[in-house]
Image (spheres, grey):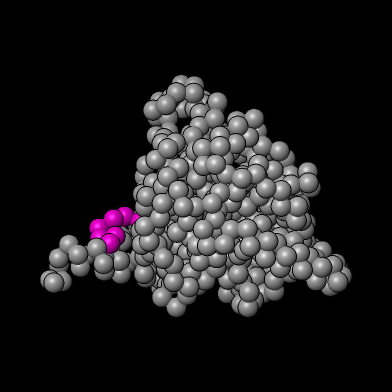
Amino acid sequence: MGINSVESMEEHTPLLGIPVTVKESIAVKGMTNQAGRVFKTPQIAKSDAPVVEQIKRCGGIILLVSNTPELCLLWETYNNVTGQTKNPYDLKRTPGGSSGGEAALLASGASLLGLTSDIGGSSRLPAMFSGIWGHKPTPYAVSFKGHHPTSDFPKWGDFFTIAPMTRYAKDLPLLLKCMNDPTGPKLTLDRAISVHGIRFFFMDNDGPSGMMRPLSRDLHAAINRVANDFNAKRVNIRKMKWSLDISLSAMLTMKNIETIYHKTEEGEQPKTVCKETVKYFFGCSDSILPSVIFGHLQNFMKIIPNSRHKHLASIIDALKTEFKEMLGNDGVFIYPTFPNTAHQHYQIYHKLLEPMYMAIFNTLGLPVTNCMIGLDRRNLPMGIQVVANPGQDHLCLAVAREMERRYGGWVRPPSEDSHSSSGSSKQRG
């Protein structure tokens, strides 16, 4: 078989000539790689992240690096280097974060395939708010190296991963196959899957906790419609009420995470939490609020007794077992991504508990896909999560493709003229 045959290209260079955009926190040789941090001298990547190398070997052409909040520490995308990213469906609203730059590019038609990252919904929330598809893979299935922030904590990869984002669900398996780390878990993405052989379960709230906001009327109706369409069984996983506690305990007790207090520019004095807080409130800090207060959160976790953290760790283990037994190798779990569609800029500061709808699956180490399921009454995209057991990413992606077929998938955002004339997304472009 010739080296330039169609079959050979499909196997070795399936992305041949296709532009790919990359979140700026992921290293692309020759491009900026400072994750939204202010430096006197621009930080240029000297080499590609392993996943970028894989994309290039598969024939992909890296087009640009996209905006992210400082050190990916917020579910809104703005920083003091490149500013704010807006939602293509309504410029007054956020595309979410921390992969909001990628989401806005894909949703607006400027890109087809994107590399993002996810530690607490950073790929899934922007995908939901922007009407596209974002997948958090099984831990270690994709190399997490070559990213800011990073950590040398042994279990960092249990929670954090580089993740694919696409405009169309049918492209997720192709992109993820190209990203799959040769030294990590092998994903069976070429398997032909019929959704008729998949068992479906669902919840439309966070269980008995009541800590997180309930779903908007449109989202509640939408997730129940999907559950009905796929004959999903309603379940009540009572331990989901611990989502906030166990996720914060697991993530904020990890040591040596890169923050503004650890890695500084050469010749600069290390920053201290108290001094940087004072500077921020007097308008003198180069950082955004989440980067400043992250140090306080880490310090707060240190005063919580180890016995409490051990108790929460036991709940994580119990939840992992419950999902393993419920889903097996042929089941998926449908769950909200967020309780509302894209909100206005900075309103996330009033909704800091709600990302736990997503972060719980980082804590549990489960693969999960945000799926676009239509527009709400404001013509804003709605999304839900489809979750599977580790190594069963192909189930999530098969369901995503079926949902795209049934509900239509990506919808073109309003034109620029519509934005300027109405100030909101009331007409389809």
Quarter where residue 180 is shown: bottom left
Q: Residue at x 42, y 26 (%)?
A: 428
- Tell me if 272 is positioned left or right of 77 in this view: right
Q: Residue at x 52, y 48 (%)?
A: 370
Q: Which residues are magenta?
A: 14-20
425 or 210: which is nearer to us? 210
Foreground residue among 98 and 328: 328
Residue placed most toward the observer, 326 or 178: 326
| Residue 100 screen position, x and y as percent | 52, 48
Image quarter hosting the N terminus: bottom left
Prevailing secondary structure of the magenta residues: loop
Residue in the picture at 64% in, 30% down = 217
Q: Is residue 176 above or below residue 420?
A: below
Taking the magenta stretch, the answer to whether it contains residue 323 is no
Q: Quadrant of the C terminus?
A: top left
Residue 280: x percent and y percent? 72, 54
Task: Give percent across and percent down for residue 425.
Answer: 49, 27
Q: Residue 85: where, in percent of width, then height?
A: 51, 44
Q: Nearer the viewer, residue 185 or 353?
A: 185
Tell me if residue 276 can be seen: no
